[in-house]
Image (cartoon, rainbow, N blue to C red):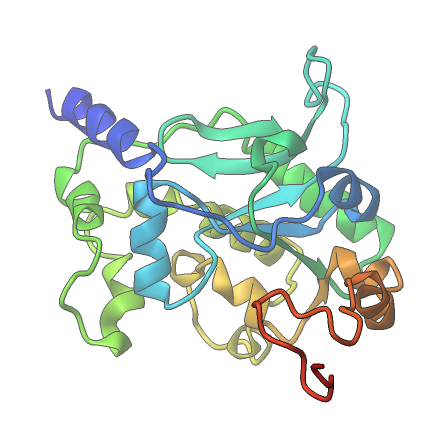
């Protein structure tokens, strides 16, 4: 019974919110051209659980996926290949196409100076995790996500994501990706590089954004962005062409 209720709660939390309006969305074609295997794609998710994660982590990002490319046995049989691997609260670890996040605000976080062998091992960890399901019987773990603005001091908000049995916590996308990087001993945050104890379950999507070991790839900047071209594209009103019904400054009226 608890498992059935847990699945219902998870599906409810995974539904999109009506008032969500993404901003700064990059074109899917540009993302597809820029992404490299091993890149982490952060997403400003539009689900109920995403709203809570953004609040608890004080961040724009509520979801993360890893780009693995169109691998044999992973890409699927659809018209568009599955190129991202992610952990979903309902589906578990699964592969999805890039179009799953079309129109969403995203950010590419790229690990620095990985060898081909390390990238292969990193992606191998994600591929081996495909199909893993999570035990959602602990209703307390799921109930924390029903409070969009839980009255918790900011220094304890991250820890709130770790309460309970840990199964729904491990279903968090960033936990899976952090474990993959740990498998090749690549740090996400500075304290991991210093070999201090920091479990992967404490990793949240924003950590890849603020990490000193991941570079941020912005599609518009990669296109040789020229702000002057934006100025030239704007319509410049001519002298005396004020649309407010009043003469423009400096224009004499007979």
Above or below residue 248? Residue 104 is above
Tell me the residue at 24%/25% (across/down).
7
Above or below residue 143? Residue 95 is above
- Horizontally, residue 209 falls left or right of residue 201, namely right
Quadrant location of the C terminus?
Answer: bottom right
Can you name the residue that lies furthest to the left here? 1
> Looking at the picture, how far across and down is residue 126, in whole percent?
61, 38
Tell me the residue at 30%/42% (across/down).
48
The quarter of the picture where residue 78 lies is: top right
> Looking at the picture, how far across and down is residue 95, in whole percent?
59, 28
> Looking at the picture, how far across and down is residue 250, in whole percent?
73, 89
- Is residue 153 visible from the viewing direction of this image? yes
- Horizontally, residue 13 falls left or right of residue 140, namely right
- Is residue 188 visible from the viewing direction of this image? no
The quarter of the picture where residue 217 lies is: bottom right
- Horizontally, residue 148 falls left or right of residue 71, namely left
């Amino acid at each position: 019974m608890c498992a059935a209720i847990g699945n219902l709660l998870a599906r409810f939390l995974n539904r999109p919110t009506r008032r969500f309006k993404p901003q700064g969305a990059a074109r899917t074609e540009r993302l597809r051209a820029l992404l490299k295997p091993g890149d982490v794609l952060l997403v400003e998710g539009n689900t109920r659980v995403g709203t809570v994660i953004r609040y608890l982590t004080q961040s724009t990002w509520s979801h993360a996926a890893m780009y693995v490319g169109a691998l044999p046995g992973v890409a699927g049989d659809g018209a568009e290949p599955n190129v991202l691997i992610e952990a979903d609260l309902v589906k578990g670890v699964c592969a999805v196409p890039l179009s799953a996040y079309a129109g969403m605000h995203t950010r590419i976080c790229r690990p620095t100076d990985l060898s081909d062998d390390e990238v292969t091992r990193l992606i191998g960890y994600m591929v081996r995790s495909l199909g893993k399901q999570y035990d959602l019987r602990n209703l307390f773990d799921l109930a924390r996500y029903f409070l969009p603005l839980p009255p918790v001091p900011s220094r304890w908000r991250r820890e709130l994501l770790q309460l309970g049995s840990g199964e729904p916590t491990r279903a968090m996308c960033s936990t899976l990706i952090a474990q993959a990087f740990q498998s090749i001993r690549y740090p996400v945050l500075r304290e991991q590089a210093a070999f201090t104890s920091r479990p992967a379950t404490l990793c949240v999507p924003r950590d890849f954004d603020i990490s000193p070991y991941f570079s941020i790839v912005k599609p518009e900047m990669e296109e040789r962005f020229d702000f002057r071209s934006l100025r030239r594209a704007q319509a410049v009103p001519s002298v005396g062409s004020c649309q407010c019904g009043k003469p423009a400054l400096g224009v004499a009226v007979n």
